[in-house]
Image (tube, helix red, strand yellow):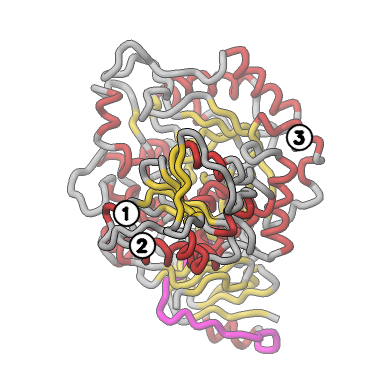
Amino acid sequence: MGTIWKGGTIYTMKQELQTVEAVFTEDGTIREIGKLDELMQKYSGQITEVQELGGGVMFPGWVDSHMHLIGHGETFLKLQLGSCTSREELLEAVRDQAKLLPEGMWIIGEGWNENDWVDSCLPEREQLDMAAPEHPVLLRRVCRHVIAVNSAGLEAAGIKEGCNEVAGGVLGRTTDGKLNGIFKEKAQDLLLEAVPGVTEEYLEAALTAAIQDCWANGLTGCHTEDLSYYGGCARTMRAFNTVIHEHEKHFRTHLLVHHLALDEWLEEKRGQGIESPMLEFGAMKLFADGALGGRTALLSRPYADAPETSGIAVHSDEELEELIVLARKHGMSVASHTIGDGAAEKVLLYLEKHPCPEGKRDRLIHGQILRPELVEQMKRLPLITDIQPSFVASDFPWVMDRIGEPGNLLIYAWKTLLNQGIPCAGGSDSPIEKVSPLEGILAAVTRTKPNQPAVYGEEERLSMYEAISLYTTGSAHAILHEMDRGMIEEGFAADFTILSRDPFQEEPQALLQNSVQMTVVNGSIVYQNE
């Protein structure tokens, strides 16, 4: 029994501007595309639902090819309170957080400043108890010398009314001598030492928040790297399994395996027990260099604004080659964080020396600074470039202070890569950048900051079709799913991103006013903009 999708513009992304009138899906798969009346007649006995798009614009499901899913979710678990203008606004944020987190989980916030508030009243224990009676609450002031805590937080820390004063610290009290939840200087340690480390419950909450936000941004899946940061590969894998499978937060998740997590992942039998069309494992991840902002991306020449350095190689040449050999030993492709051309030169040398296993693809993550001869080398390899269009809006113009006169360097040269036949996939690197594909597409097409006229590298601007392809066919190709994902085609996954407006029919800046109308994963609506 299946669903007819109709009543909007449906772009297949097989070819530029190719559309179909309707789509019939069944059991999470696209069964057929074509004319509405023909599909209605052919499948009349199998149609259980007709889904009206209401004039919306349907694409194959958008996939973020590079993010940190748990890290993105963590941004929702720690309250950012610097923008609050009153105590009541802070308390409202705490109330909202209490609705999101499981009962008993700590609510952590930071950045509040009562001097910016209209009332200048501290968020004391009594008010916090009313806002979140079932959650320990700990809120750090912007100066980090004062925290506010509720009764559940005091109880969790074992702090009772008769506790002693702390040398070098202050325990705030009411006029009748009771603790008011305000702790200053060294007295803060009584609370900070009680905050638990990352638990599986925390990981599950972070993943749930992240997936729900990704749905709201039109994402039906992502490629992520989380296995080495949260106290063990096995527990992180369990959290993914719990949220995606047991809690049915369906989101097509492709996990890279950091080389530091490789041994444990192998001990866990490569996650075979939890793999599914919603959860799979891919390349071994490594870091070849750092970042341009801190001048640690490895360049082939000195930094223009710090000629004493060319950046940092995270591994020696011998170590880098050993890691790539290790991946090949276990039949794995390699996904290397590679920002500078110096790092790209080293990585490409060993990728070519130790060929990728048949039928797999390596990837350069970021690939922001390259040279023509490196691009020629990339063309010889089964390799994709994992790019982050939003970096243009974030990094320019300061990045040119780092680079100086480009000379033969290719700077964020995505059009060049595509023209040379090198596949590219599009991602955000969230939480470093916003997870919004709409903003990423805008940056790729305009090479500007939102609502600003300056264009950075005009010759490297992508067409709207090329930019959207980064998140559809590009992300599918990166993980060997070009034959079943990334297009609206018979036999492909029934994953759809439906927008309110047609980006092909408007100026690029209109993307900022566009919105996600609906997100569909495996044939089911997981998000609908009400």
Residue 215 lies, with reference to residue 166, above or below; the image says below
Q: How crowded is mark 2: few (under 14 residues within 10 Å), some or many (20 or more)?
A: many
Where 291 sits versus 79, above or below?
above
Left of 3 or right of it: where is 310?
Answer: left
**Left or right of 301 in this view: 354:** right
Which kind of residue does numbered mark 2 sit on? Arg
Give the image quarter of residue 499: bottom left
Residue that appears at 62% across and 80% down: 3
| Residue 191 marker | none
Q: Is residue 63 in sight in this rendering?
A: no
Which residue does the image show at 59% across and 50% down from the upper left? 162
| Quadrant hosting residue 315 | top right
How much space separates mark 3 and mark 2, taking CA atoms?
46 Å
Point out the tag, 3 or 2, that comes first from the N-terminus.
2
Discs 1, 2 touching: Cβ within 8 Å: yes
Q: Residue 114 carries which label?
A: 1
Q: Give the range drawn in magenta.
A: 44-61
List the residue tagged with mark 2: 87
Which amino acid type corresponds to the residue marked 3 in the rendered image?
Glu
The question of residue 329 being in magenta is answered with no
| SS for dot 2 | helix
Q: Helix, strand or loop at disc 1?
A: helix
Identify residue for label 3.
Answer: 264
The residue carrying pointer 3 sits among few (fewer than 14), some (14 to 19) or many (20 or more) residues within 10 Å by Cα, namely: some
Question: Viewer-proximal residue, 460 or 426?
Answer: 426
Q: Which of pointers 1 and 2 lies earlier in the amino acid sequence?
A: 2
Magenta stretch contains residue 53: yes
Asked whether disc 3 touches disc 1, contact meaning CB atoms under 8 Å apart, the reply is: no
Q: Between marks 1 and 2, how big is the CA–CA gap? A: 7 Å
Counting other residues with Cα less than 10 Å from the Cα at mark 1, is it few (<14), some (14-19), or many (20 or more)? Answer: some
Q: Which amino acid does label 1 sit on?
A: Glu
Cα separation between marks 3 and 1:
47 Å
